[in-house]
Amino acid sequence: MSKYQDKNIQKFAEIFKALSNPNRLKIFLRLISCCQPGTPATIKESVEAEGCACVGELGQDLGIVPSTISHHIKELRRAGLIRMERHGQKIECSMDPETLAALQGFFSQ
């Protein structure tokens, strides 16, 4: 077996479970393509962040309603793939650079 301990295997299983949903994978790939890890993207309908998609835009392009997008973002956050921070009415979402680095290490073995 690889160098990963059981707790790390469990964490990777949670990540892969979150990404196994096609809609969550689409959202994750969209966010990763428009935002560098650790760089916030505003996640709020009708509010645009430079270089990143908002919930409304993601829903239109992916054919997913905003409430479902919000659910999937919550699941990606729970798995540790993204971070969220509220600033007033806006919610900033960014890729978790540590989790992405761990995934890169996992696949480079």
Image (cartoon, grey):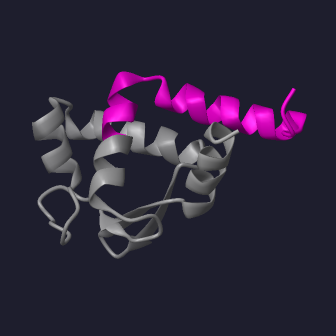
Percent position of residue 96, x then y: 54, 59
Residue name at image x 28 percent, y 46 percent: 30
**Boundaries of the magenta span:** 1-27
71 left or right of 12 in image: left
Percent position of residue 73, x then y: 41, 44
24 left or right of 3 in image: left
Viewer-proximal residue among 100 and 23: 100
Residue name at image x 47 percent, y 69 percent: 38
Q: Is the magenta stretch mostly helix, strand or loop?
A: helix
Percent position of residue 11, x then y: 72, 38
Indicate the quadrant where residue 17 lies: top right
Residue name at image x 15 percent, y 66 percent: 48
Single out the residue that lies furthest toward the front. 109
- Asked whether 76 falls inside the magenta stretch, the response is no
Q: Is residue 31 above or below residue 69?
A: below
Q: In this view, does 68 lie above or below 97?
A: above
Pick the quarter of the image with the C terminus. Answer: top right
Percent position of residue 13, x then y: 68, 29
Single out the residue that lies furthest toward the bottom. 87
Pick the quarter of the image with the N terminus. Answer: top right
77 left or right of 44 in image: right
Indicate the quadrant where residue 91 lies: bottom left
Viewer-proximal residue among 56 and 3: 3
